[in-house]
Image (cartoon, rainbow, N blue to C red):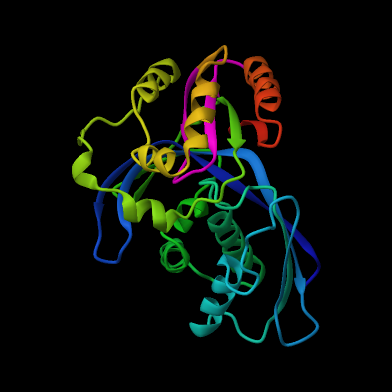
Amino acid sequence: MKKSSIKSFCKVNLFLKVIKKMANGYHSIESLIIFCNLYDKILISQAKSQKDKIIFSGRFQKGINKKKNTVSKLLNLLREKKILKGKYFKIIVQKEIPHGSGLGGGSSNAASLLKFLNFKMKLNLNKKKLREIGGLIGFDVPVYLEKKNNLILLKKNKIIKMNRKLNINLLIVYPNQICSTKKIYNKFKIKNIKRSRFLPISTNKKKMIYSLINSNNDLQNIVVKIYPKVKSVIKYIKSQKGCFFARITGSGSACIGIFSSKRNAVYAKKMIKLKYPKYWSIVAKTI
């Protein structure tokens, strides 16, 4: 197998509602998910030895368990199920998506690699089987198996693909804080949140943006209580010209701001850099 390069895109939760805790320990959620042009690059080639070699490099390699991660977990699972036999790989993951940020870098890495191996190694796994394997790696991995140029509605953990794009400009700010998804969800109490049947979905972009302004991320109050600096970042993004709304994505700590134009998003990034010179930020666009 020749050396190949895979793009592993990040996701952003435009809103997130926690419905209930399930018997398997995961939580049932509703969320509107987009993918944007921020990605990790995965370089893969066949290993000469009978052992995988997995290397993490790049800006955000720090904090990743080199022995237990989504990539190693996927390879081990495929071999345990006798789907992948007699093949070992050298894999270099160039991390450009912040670790522990709620942007789903680890889940995206696993899903991107699973799709690649299914095609390249002719594993012949159908969509249902791919989702099943992905779900064993992480509850949100199946989301990344979908086409990236569509909106994804996650309703009570069921994936509903919307055949349309939402072209938006967004600013992502990472306040150098690794958030534990497990820790955030464990502290969340569903009874403290008012439930609503309303979902901020519309075929009209302006109406959808307006609806999203009036929605939220149920996990945000927990995150800002544990990490107060996240609250100040959200507040500052909101204060910038042309910002429709700002909140955390996933379980944090990355903060997102949705802007009326790329120009406004770029200007807001400059202001963020002046106020928080040590924080990482990027202007991104949906793909």
Q: Classify 35 as above or below 267.
A: below
Picture coordinates of residue 239 (x, y %)? 52, 16
Q: Would you say 191 lies left or right of 243 here?
A: left
Quadrant of res 262: top right
Q: Quadrant of the C terminus?
A: top right
Picture coordinates of residue 27 (x, y %)? 31, 55
Viewer-proximal residue among 115 and 285? 285
Number of residue marks = 0
Magenta stretch holds residue 43: no
> Going 41% across and 66% down the picture, which residue do you hit?
132
Magenta stretch holds residue 256: yes
> Going 43% across and 15% down the picture, which residue do you hit?
206
> Going 42% across and 64% down the picture, which residue do you hit?
135
The residues colored magenta run: 244-261
Q: Quadrant of the N terminus?
A: bottom right
Picture coordinates of residue 237 (x, y %)? 55, 23
Picture coordinates of residue 139 (x, y %)? 41, 59
Residue 287 seen from this side: no
Q: Classify 97 as above or below 80.
A: above
Q: Classify 206 as above or below 86.
A: above
Q: Would you say 19 lies left or right of 209 here?
A: left
Residue 187 seen from this side: yes
> Going 77% across and 79% down the picture, which residue do you hit?
47
Q: Would you say 205 lies left or right of 99 here?
A: left
